[in-house]
Image (cartoon, coloured by chain):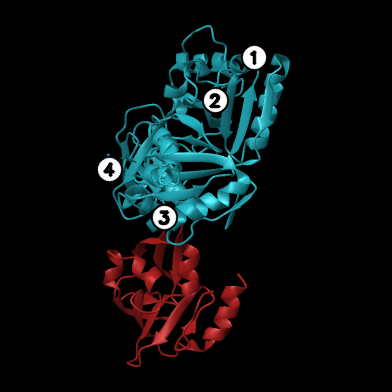
Amino acid sequence: MSNAPADRRYARSHEWVRDLGDGTVEIGISDHAQNSLGDLVFVEVPETGRALTAGEACAVVESVKAASDIYSPLAGTVVAVNEQLASAPELINQQPYEAGWIFRLRPSEGAAVSGLLDAKAYLAVADSE
Amino acid sequence: MVDFGGWDMPLSYGSQIEEHHSVRQHAGLFDVSHMRALDVSGARAGECLRLLLANDVARLKDPGKALYSCMLNEAAGILDDLIVYRLAGDHFRLVVNAGTADKDEAWTRGQAAPLDVRIVARTDQALLAVQGPQARAHVAALLSPPDAARALNLDVFVGAQIGDWFIARTGYTGEDGFEIMLPAEAAEELWRALTARGVRCCGLGARDTLRLEAGMNLYGLDMDEHTHPLESGLEWTVAWDPPERAFIGRVALERLRAAGTVRRLCGLVLEERAVMRAHQRVIVPGEGEGQVTSGTFSPTLSRSIALARLPPGQAREVQVEVRGKLLPARVVRPPFVRHGRALI
């Protein structure tokens, strides 16, 4: 059984978004996603300053099994990336909701989290896969 | 869990990479009961296998000795790769892949029919592989002192019936260890005894990264009915001598060898941070194009390694198309890792 903290929202494509309260959000992948991917070996993060549209492929997580695109759940500008993932991709497996965050975004004007799922709805999606 | 040749098998029990490292550094346990054992016996069993296999069972002088071989069709296409043991004089055991087991059994029975050879599929047996530098010691600890001594005295690629277990010093990981064939109903107890000793359960995922680091082919990816041993890095398994031994596929294989333009199965090492996967395109400057037959991330080397079939030639530098990008890779001679040590 995977878990999904209630303090954030989720995309159907298995990314989570946490409001950091300073006008930026943090984005990572869910426990369900890391578990299906298996041991991660490489993570390709977006460049800081890059403008993203909602749903745009902007990062790649590669496990022993397969490579997967990560889609930005919101439109916005990348303000930070998790540099630790370059040498320790396993952080995503170990702590998908904390140390395994992937990038931070300043959402564009009007970008809304309302189209995203809450934890309960996301778990229903994840468990049905 | 995934379907593997009709068997439900775990890709991993926990972290695949940790399972991999356990085998390189300590000991790991694999349930490989999906592989099928075919016992071949009768006065003409040896004759039958000398016809059926590209390697020569006449090389198995002593009981218990094992040999790795391809089984070919008339066109020299590889029907399967297998291990054959001589259990006793006229009694042999083949251990074949799960995905090809039905086909292999039918083919073997067809070839054996005129020779009055008896073939028994040992579906009553389970097969557990215990692999790693400490694997043999863990198995020996479960045996009586005289049986333990016999097991520990087995040479590489030799097996022996010790009590209810057929213990062989073989494997598919590039590490020392045993493969133990035992009555299926006794397998769970052995599994529990080994895991209780700290031997780690390993799934198909670790089995694949271990065999690839060890430079061993996987049937269905690195070779199949449409490829022959010479272009699969397996010429060393073809016993050309004696020349009068007319094994199935020999005529076609000799023709291919004489033609001399044989593709080569090579090892590749990727310098960049990406992972090569089966079927990716390989560009060989001046020589043409080839294909990755199997690729993965090597936990021991912390980079991607692959086997690839390339056009005839000597190129040492190639490019692999990984997710739309051409990345440089180095051509190497497998194995990549043996006995816990990087070789490239």
Same chain, labels 1 and 4: yes
The residue at which mark 3 appears reads as B197
Which of disc 3 and disc 4 is earlier in sequence? 3
Give the chain letter for red: A
Name the spot of residue B174 as percent of width and height, x first.
38, 39
Q: Alpha-carbon distance for marks 2 and 1?
A: 14 Å
User: In which chain is the residue bearing label 1?
Assistant: B
Q: Quadrant of the N terminus of chain B?
A: bottom right
Same chain, labels 2 and 4: yes
Which of disc 3 and disc 2 is earlier in sequence? 2
Whether pointer 1 and pointer 3 mark residues with C-beta atoms closer than 8 Å, the reply is no
How many residues crowd mark 4 within 10 Å: few (<14), some (14–19), many (20+)? few
Q: Please identify the residue farthest to the top as the structure is shown.
A: B244
- Provide the secondary structure element on which disc 3 rests: loop
Q: What shade does chain B have?
A: cyan
**A122 left or right of B135?**
right
Hey, what amino acid is under mark 2? Leu
The residue at which mark 1 appears reads as B43
Eye-nearest disc, 2 or 4: 2
Hey, what amino acid is under mark 3? Arg
> In the figure, residue B273 lies in which quadrant?
bottom left
Which of disc 3 and disc 1 is earlier in sequence? 1
Along the viewing direction, whichever of B261 and B60 lies nearer the viewer: B60
User: In which chain is the residue bearing label 2?
Assistant: B
- Provide the secondary structure element on which disc 1 rests: loop
The residue at which mark 4 appears reads as B341
Along the viewing direction, whichever of A19 and B157 lies nearer the viewer: B157
Hey, what amino acid is under mark 4? Arg
Which of disc 1 and disc 2 is earlier in sequence? 1
User: In which chain is the residue bearing label 4?
Assistant: B
